[in-house]
Amino acid sequence: MSTKANREPFFVKDCALVTIATGQKAQNLKEMREHLHNIHLGSIYHHFWGGLLRPRFDEPEYNNDFAEWVHHALQDNILAERLSVIDPDPFVNLESLRQELLEAIDQRLDEIGTLTWANPDMQFHFVRAQMVVFDTRGKIEEPEELVEAVSKMSVGSIFYHFIDARRRSPEMMDDFRAWLRSCGHEDLCSQVAAVDPYFGSLEELRTQLTNLFAHYFRRVSG
Amino acid sequence: MTSIQDYVEVTGENVIDRLRQLARPLRGMKVVHVNSTYVGGGVAEILSKLVPLQKDLGLDVRWEVIRGEEAFFQVTKSFHNALQGIPVQLGDGFFKIYEETGAQNSEELRSILEEANIVIIHDPQPLPLLRSCPNRKGKWIWRCHIDLSHPYRPVWQYLRNYVMEYDASIFSLADFAQPLPHIQYLMPPSIDPLSEKNMDLTPEEVQATKLQFGLDPDRLIMLQVSRFDRFKDPLGVIKSYRLVRSFARSLQLVLAGGEATDDPEGAAVLAEVRNEAGGDKDIHVLLLPPDAHVTINALQRGADLVVQKSLKEGFGLTVTEALWKGKPVIGGDAGGIRLQIVNHHTGFLVKTPEGAALRARYLLRHPDKALEMGRIAKELVRQNFLLTRNLQEYLSILVALVYGDQERIELQLKSAP
C-alpha cells in the first residue's frame, strides 16, 4: 500500500454546465437519424448524461432524452424501449454509442411504413454543453476520509468525479477508483466499479458511494 | 444595496464560493448591458439585480438604456409581436425609424461600447448598435428574452441580419434557438429571493394588501400578475374565472399588472380587459406602479389560485415568483412556462380557459395536494431559477467566451487565464 508521502491527495472539484444549442432539430425519425449521423459527439453525451443534472420529481420513464422524445413526441413505444435500454457506460467511446443509436433507429425505420411527425412545438432540439470545473479547496489525504467527504459533496462534484471522469480517463475509470488504486485499495476499486452510474439520480449515487465506503472502512478497521 | 454575501443564507456558502471562482478570471473586465427600459418588465427587473452583484464580484459593469420616441417603441413592439409569431403590418417608415434611433443612440454610447470587453444587448430594440461601433474591441452577445420559436419570417429575416454579426446569442430555451452562424447559449432567467417582490411577508402584511384593494380576505382569490398584453391572455383568464365561479361562488379574480415604458399597447389591452370585466365587482383589475413589488408579493402569497395563462411566453418570471412562494401555478403550455411547470408536480400546463378552470377546480378540491405541489415548486426554484444560478450561468458563459470552445474549462484557484 502506498504511503501518504508518495501519493497525491484527492482534490475535490465541482462543475457547472454551460448549455449550448446546436441549432439542429428533428421532427420525425428520419430527421433524427440524419442529425444523429453528424451531430457533435458532445450532444450525444449530453442527451444521455445531462439529465442527471436536471431536477427530477419522480423516476424517469425512460433513461435518455432520445427515448423520452420518441415516446412523448412520436408515441413510438417500441423504439422508446429499445433506445432506453441502451446503457452508455460500457461503450468504449461516444462514436460507438452513436452507431448503436443509429442501428436501433435504422431497424425501426425498416419496420414502420409511414413516418410520424411530432407537433411543431415538440421537436427534438440537439443540445450540447461546455463544462466549467471549479476547485472547491477540498482535499482528501486518507482513503478513510472518503466516507465523510463524499457524503458532503455537491451533486456537481459527484457528476465530475464519478461520471465525467470516465470521459477523461483513457481507462474510462472514475476518479475515486483511480485514486483508491494509487492508495493500494484494489478490492475497494472493484466494489466501486460495480456501482451503476446510469440508473439513478446523483443524490442516490452519493448515498450509495457513501454507504459503500463506510461499510468497507468499518470492516477494514474492525 | 444587496451584496453577494447576503445570498449565503438562501443558497449556502458553496454556491457563493463558486461564483467568486468564476468571477476571478473576469475581474476588471468591462461589461456593458444595454436594453430599452429601466423600469417595467422582466428584463429591467433582472438587470437591476444582476448588475450590482456582477459589480460586487469585481467586474466593471455598466447598464445603459437606449432612448427613443413613441414611434420607435411602436416599431419595436411590432417587432416583439412578430418575433413571437404574430404577422404584423410593417409600415413604410418602420425600418427607417428603427435604424435612425439606433444610430442616434450609438452617438451617445459608442465610446463606452467600443471600449467594452463584453457587450450584452438585450432583445431587439438596441440590436443595430453593433453596426455603429466599427472599432469595437470586445465580444458582443445578443440576449434574446423572447419566445422566438415560430417568428413571423419577414421581420425575423430583417433582424437576423443584425444578429448574425454578433459573436454569440443567449436564448432562454432550446426551442427559441435559430440557425445562426455563431454559438448559441441557453440560459433561463431568474428571480431574486431577497428582493421586495420575493422576500418573506407576515400574514398581517398580506391581509392589509387584500384590504387595501377591496378584496374580501375571507373569500377565495384567483390571481394573474402580468402586463396587460394579449399574449398573456387576460380575457382567457376572465373566462376561466367565470367557469370556476360556477363551482366556487366565493371566488374573486385579481388581474394585476403594471405598465412598461417600452409597451405602447398596454393601454388598449387594459381597456379591453375592463370592458370584458363589465360590472362584475369581484373582478379586480389593478394597474400598479412599477415599484409595487411588495404589493405583488402580498397578492401572490395571499392567492388561493395562481394563473399565468400566456399564449406565448419568453420565460414567465411571474410563474417563478409564485412557485417560490409555494404556490402551484396553472400556466399556459407555452415557452419558458414549460421549463417551470412540471405537469402535476409544480402545477398544470393548460391550453384553454376551460383547461385552466378544470385544474383550478382540482386544486380547490385537493388542498393537501396543492400544498405538496407548492413544496416541490419552491424546491424547483431554489435549485434552478434563483438569481445566484443565473449569475453563475452568466459568468460561465463569459468565461467560456474568454476560453473559447473547449469542452471542459478548468478554473484554478489562483491563476487567471
Image (spheres, grey):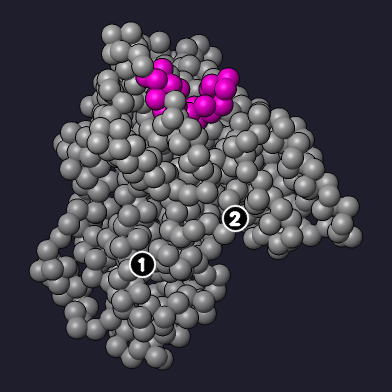
* Residue at 24%, 54% in the rendered image: B197
Chain name for mark 1: B
Q: Chain of mark 2?
A: A
Dot 1: few (<14), some (14–19), or many (≥20) neighbours within 10 Å? many
B265, A37: nearer the viewer:
A37
Position above or below: A43 against B81: above
Assign a secondary structure to mark 1: helix
Question: Is A171 in the magenta?
Answer: yes
Please say whether residue B163 is visible from this viewpoint: no
Task: Say which amino acid is labelled 2.
Answer: Tyr
Image quadrant in which you'd find residue A186: top left
Q: Tag on residue A62?
A: 2
Q: Position of residue B153 (x, y in %)?
A: 69, 46
Magenta region: which residues?
A160-185
Across and down, in percent, residue A204 comes to 40, 48
Q: Secondary structure at mark 2?
A: loop
Up the image or down, B301 lies above or below B146; here it is below
- Quadrant hosting residue B293: bottom left
Q: Residue at 32% across / 41% down in the picture?
A: A215
Instruction: Give coordinates of residue B50: x percent, y percent.
Output: 31, 36
Residue A152, disc: none
Q: Residue A162 location in percent, x, y?
A: 45, 33
- Image: B314 above or below B353: above
Q: Are marks 1 and 2 on the same chain?
A: no
B392 and B409: which is toward the camera: B409
For the C terminus of chain B, the image quarter is: top left
How many labels were placed on the picture? 2
User: Label 1, on which residue?
Assistant: B373
